[in-house]
Image (spheres, rainbow, N blue to C red):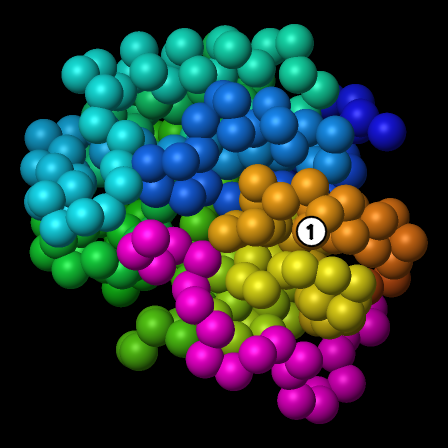
Amino acid sequence: MVPERSEVDPGGSDAVVPFVPPVAIASLSGRSDAAWARAAAPYVGCAVLGGIALDPASRAAARDLVERGREEFLPADPFAFIDSQVAALEDVPLRPAVNVRSTTRPPIERAAAVCASHDAILEVNAHCRQPELCAVGCGESLLADRDRLSEYVAAAATAGVTVSVKARAGVSGVDLPAVARTIEDAGGHILHLDAMDTERAVADVTAATDLFVIANNEVRDRESVREYAEYGADAVSVGRPSDDPTVLDRVASAAAALDLGPGSDSRSAPGSGGESDSETGSIPEDAPL
C-alpha cells in the first residue's frame, strides 16, 4: 500500500514522526532525483534527493569528482533544481528530503527556505568522505567542526524546515554522541546515520539524544531491520538497492512487522551486544559508483 504523507511539527525533534512508513531511500550522488523517488514511493515514507553542491567551493569539488568518474548533480542553478525536483513530487505520497553540501551558511539558509515551501526535509551532508569535498570543508569534515555544523543546522531550522544531518560512524577522533547533541541543541530533528558496520553506534546516539534516528548501511532484509530496531533506530534507509523493488518490499514489510518507529519499545530494548549480522567490510552507501 502506498503510504500517506505525514504531518510534521518543525518545532520539536520528537513531537511528530517525520514520515511514515519508517523507511527512507538515501541519496546517491548523481542518481537520486524525482523520478527515482517516484519509483520507490510504494514502499517508502521518505526519499532523500541529492546530494546537491550549493556554493562555488562545493561545486568546484563536485566538478573535480565528475572528472575522475563520479556521478554528481551540477545544475546551473542548484536552488531552482531543488525547487523543481521537490515540486515534481507534490502528487507523490512520500516525504521528500534534499541532501545538500556547502562551505558557508547562506546557501544552507536559501536551500532550507526552498525545502520549507514544499514541506520537504533539508538534510545537511556531514557524510561524504571524498578528499575533494573534505578539503573544502564539506561532508565528513563537518563532524570534526561541530561549531560550523551547529551553525548550519541552526540556520536551516530558522527557516522553519525539518532539519536532518547525514553522518557516518567510525570516523577517527569524532565523538558521535557529542555530534548528535550538537545537532539537537542547534534545532535539528533527524540524524541519518551511516553505521559503517558499527551498528552499536545507533545505540550510542539514541541514548544521547531524542533525535529521530534513521539507520543506514546494509539495510536489505528483516534481519538488518531487526538489528537496527534493537539498537533503537526509529527508521531505516536503503542506499544502493534503492531502485530494487524486491529489496524495498522486503525492508518495508520488515519495518511493518517489527513495528519500527517512535512509540515502539526499541529504545528501551537495545541490542544484546552480540556481533553484528552485517557483512564485514561492506561498501559504504556513498562510495564512488
- Residue 27 lies, in percent from the top left, at 45, 41
Residue 42 rendering spot, x and y as whole percentages:
74, 30
Across and down, in percent, residue 166 comes to 44, 50
Q: Main secondary structure of the magenta part?
A: loop
**In the figure, 194 relative to 161: above or below?**
below
Q: Give the side of residue 70 with respect to residue 11, left or right.
A: left
Asked whether residue 40 is drawn in magenta, I would say no
Report the residue at 56% width, 28% height from top: 37
Instruction: Describe residue 127's horizontal placement relative to residue 61 as left or right.
Output: right
Taking 75 as reference, is 89 left or right? right
Q: Which residue is mark 1?
A: 247
Say above or below: 233 vs 4.
Answer: below
Q: Decide which of 221, 128 is in the foreground and name it.
A: 221
The crowd level at tag 1 (other Cα within 10 Å; few <14, some 14-19, many 20+) is some
Q: Residue at x 57, y 33 (%)?
A: 47
Q: In the image, is residue 282 above or below residue 114? A: below
Does residue 19 show up?
Answer: no
Count of picture labels: 1
Residue 1 in view: yes
Residue 99 appears in which quarter of the rendering? Answer: top left
Q: Residue at x 44, y 34 (%)?
A: 32
Amino acid at the residue labelled 1: Val
Relative to 53, say whether 129 is above or below. Answer: below
Q: Which residues are magenta?
A: 267-289
Front-most of 273 and 258? 258
Which quadrant holds residue 54? top left
Q: Looking at the image, which residue is at 27% across and 60% down?
A: 129
Dividing the image into 4 quarters, which one contains the N terminus? top right
Residue 234, position as x, y percentages in the image: 71, 53
